[in-house]
Amino acid sequence: MTAETRGGRVIKPELMPPGPPLKPFVYQRPPGIMSQIERQEKRLLAIWRARNTESERNGETKEEAGPGSW
């Protein structure tokens, strides 16, 4: 068995645990979490755009519209 490199360090064969070489842990995002975030983002963007176009149709600018209306 040859010495294996992990993160730039050489591990001596006698210090290696028995069995197959260990894989580095990689965080896996739970499936579906990105699509949930993307759906929410699209929904909020659609609401924001609708409010913006509504106030523009009424001839208001963002300053005139006041907080809470856009």
Image (tube, rainbow, N blue to C red):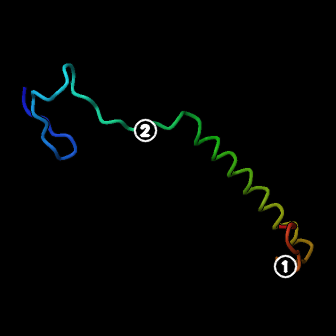
Q: Secondary structure at mark 2?
A: loop
* Image quadrant where one finds the N terminus: top left
Which residue corresponds to mark 2?
27
Residue 17: x %, y % from top left: 20, 24
Question: Which quadrant holds residue 63?
Answer: bottom right
Query: Mark 1 and mark 2: span between their CA atoms?
Result: 46 Å
Residue 68: x %, y % from top left: 86, 66
Out of 22 and 68, give the one closest to the viewer: 22
Which residue corresponds to mark 1?
61
Q: Secondary structure at mark 1?
A: loop
Question: Which quadrant holds residue 9?
Answer: top left
Three-letter code for the amino acid on which mark 2 is drawn = Tyr
Q: Residue at x 63, y 46 (%)?
A: 37
Q: From the viewer's perspective, is the residue at label 1 or at label 2 nearer? A: 2
Question: Which quadrant holds residue 13?
Answer: top left
Q: Earlier in the sequence, mark 1 or mark 2?
A: 2
